[in-house]
Image (tube, grey):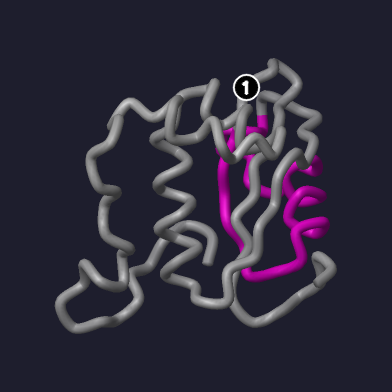
Amino acid sequence: MGMQDADGCWVYILRCADDSYYTGSTREAVEKRVAEHNTKRYENSFTATRLPVELVFAQHFPVITDAIAMERRIKGWSRRKKEALVAGQFDRLRTLSKRGNRPAAPVLRDAVPDGTAPQDEGC
């Protein structure tokens, strides 16, 4: 699947000019969202003072609440863990986890009692 518009939601990671990472989500095409970051569409955003940004990771989720849960999970990760994900070193993710072998947090849609999708920044 290409990075065109689709049902569901994209989770993406940008590398900023200051070498920091920004994680976000969008229902639109990822390329369009990256362009919005680079043109300061949201002037008070994290990326607005760290331009240009470069897309280094994107993954599509058919279920929006899964994308939101993944975005929030990645935002809590260490820099090293984000870099392992960007590099496709999936086997390193568990060893880089601060949580060790404890079970992962539940997916958001499972945590919401009525099963409705919570609102979040991107999706």
Say which quadrant the N terminus sits in: bottom right
Query: Vertical placement of 12 versus 87: above or below?
Result: below
**Residue 58 percent coordinates (x, y):** 69, 52
Quarter holding residue 9? bottom right
Q: Nearer the viewer, residue 35 or 89?
A: 89
Q: Is residue 95 above or below residue 62?
A: above
> What residue type is disc 1 on?
Ser
Position of residue 70 in the picture relative to residue 22 (left or right): left
Residue 81 image offset from top left, x and y in percent = 52, 28
Q: Residues within 10 Å of mark 1 (few under 14, many from 20)?
A: few
Location of residue 61 in the rendering, given as x and y in whole percent from the top left corner = 58, 69
In the image, is 84 to the left or to the right of 98?
A: right
Up-down relation of residue 5 to residue 48 (above or below): below
In front here: 31 or 36? Answer: 31
The stretch drawn in magenta includes residue 47: yes
* Residue name at image x 82 percent, y 56 percent: 31
The residue pinned by badge 1 equals 20
Residue 33 x %, y %: 73, 55
Magenta highlight on residue 60: no
Count of all numbered marks drawn on residues in the image: 1
Q: Which residues are magenta?
A: 22-48
- For residue 36, side relative to residue 104 (left or right): right
**What kind of element bears circle 1?**
loop
Question: At 69% from the left edge and 16% from the top edge, which residue is drawn?
Answer: 18
Query: Residue drawn 71% across and 33% down?
Result: 87
> Based on the displayed image, in which of its 4 quarters is residue 59 positioned?
bottom right
